Image (cartoon, rainbow, N blue to C red):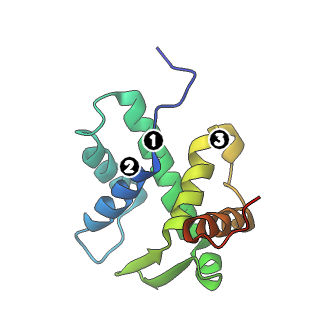
Amino acid sequence: MFSPLPPPYPFDVFLRHFQEHSALRTTDKPASFDAGLAQLLVYLEPQYPDDEQRTYVALRYLLIIQYLARHMRELDEADFAVFGSEKEGALVADHLLRALHHFFTTRPLSMLEDGPSPQEVMELAATMRELDTGDGNAA
């Protein structure tokens, strides 16, 4: 039976997936979307025996990765990420990942369409960076 609430997908778990799944790449050639999805589902299966939760996590994870790929130039220019190369990938700030995780796990798919604007993501990431470093103004 379908649950009205999304399955849990905490940021620390997403971050572990981001780090581990990135390390699974075994060739210099980027995988096709289908191959990448199959690899992700194999990776997630032991962690999520429940199909609904595994599907939710895989979809949200892929949406975040796709968003990063689509907006890497803007994120790089704004110093939230550094694109190395197709082979080496990119360095992505934790506060950017935290902002993307927030957007893609707190909204229903029907509200996401192309995702939030890069400006919205960067504003939230900047706020999260300030909170992490204590540079924000406390109210």
Q: Residue furthest top?
A: 1
Provide the residue designation for mark 3.
Answer: 107
Question: Residue 2: x, y in percent?
Answer: 50, 18
Name the residue: 22% across, 69% down: 26
Asked whether disc 3 touches disc 1, contact meaning CB atoms under 8 Å apart, the reply is no
Q: At numbered mark 2, what does the secondary structure look like: helix, strand or loop? A: helix
Q: Give me the C-alpha separation between circle 2 and circle 1.
A: 7 Å
Within 10 angstroms of label 3, few (less than 14), some, or many (20 or more) residues? Answer: few
Provide the residue designation for mark 2.
Answer: 13
Looking at the rendered structure, which numbered label has been put on residue 9? 1
Of the image marks 3 and 2, the number of the one nearer the N terminus:
2
Decide which of 92, 39 is in the foreground and name it: 92
Residue 80 is left or right of residue 11, and the answer is right
Asked whether disc 2 touches disc 1, contact meaning CB atoms under 8 Å apart, the reply is yes
Question: Residue 125: x, y in percent?
Answer: 63, 66
Decide which of 70, 138 is in the foreground and name it: 138
| Circle 1: residue type | Tyr
Q: At numbered mark 3, what does the secondary structure look like: helix, strand or loop? A: loop
Within 10 angstroms of label 1, few (less than 14), some, or many (20 or more) residues? Answer: some
| Circle 3: residue type | Arg
Of the image marks 3 and 1, the number of the one nearer the N terminus:
1
